[in-house]
Image (cartoon, rainbow, N blue to C red):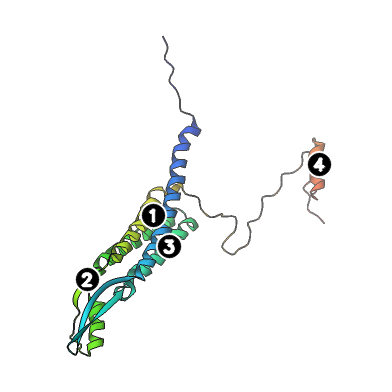
Amino acid sequence: MEYVTAVPHPRTEAAGPARAGRRSLAVALLSGALGAAVALLATRQRWSEGTATVAGGSFPLTARGSDVTGVPAALAIVGLAALVAVFAVRRAGRFAVSALLALSGLGIVTAALVGASDSGALDEKAAQASGDTSATVASFSHTAWPYVAAVGGLLILLAGLLALRYGRLWPAMSGRYERGGAPRPRRAAALADPDRPEDIWKALDRGEDPTGADPA
């Protein structure tokens, strides 16, 4: 009795990586863009609050994320630019840009978590309000916005990791145009076969010399 071994079709084998590339691309684009938007939005919100004592009284102070640290906003813009640049480069360049994307997300997470417990911005405001450079803020507390910024950084980090893993399967920008902006010259048309009249007529219709001779 003979056994027949099924041989996988080449198209079936190629469908798996192609499908993984499309899915990872969609997830990376969504998570990267959303992460950058979330991080930028979070840095504009109130991160910390406290009170300062002036002339025997106290009044509240607040600090936004941009007052505490400018790192998350800057890295969000870098990450967004890297996400777009992934499609403009190939091979080693794509790997480098993908690594930059992942590092941007990691930097946002680190800066946001450190900023959640940083009272430096409020201490500066307390010193300005009281006129005492040694004054510090009292009753320090933070909001949830630093952690929201950290979530945005995690989304950008996810996009970078996906680019590192599946970036080779993603499409690239068309290479039809050179760096100077001029289109690449087209390949010379094949000479018409003198034994095939239809080829001669097609060449004449295109305004070409079917014999291939250079015009005088």
Q: Which mark is residue 141?
A: 2
- The circle drawn on residue 159 is 1
- The amino acid pointed to by label 3 is Leu
Disc on the earlier residue, 1 or 2: 2
Query: Which quarter of the rendering shows the N terminus?
Result: top left
Residue 201 is left or right of residue 63, and the answer is right
Label 2's element? Answer: strand
The residue that disc 3 covers is: 80
Q: Callout 1: helix, strand or loop?
A: helix
Query: CB under 8 Å between callouts 1 and 2?
Result: no
Earlier along the polypeptide chain: callout 1 or callout 4? 1
According to the picture, the residue beneath numbered tag 4 turns out to be 200
Q: Quadrant of residue 202?
A: top right
Among the two numbered marks 2 and 3 on one chain, the one whose residue lies closer to the N terminus: 3
Query: Which is nearer the N-term, disc 3 or disc 1?
Result: 3
For the point 58% across and 60% down, the residue is 178
What type is the residue that disc 2 sits on? Ser
Q: How crowded is mark 4: few (under 14 residues within 10 Å), some or many (20 or more)?
A: some
* Cα–Cα gap, marks 3 and 1: 10 Å
Badge 3 element: helix
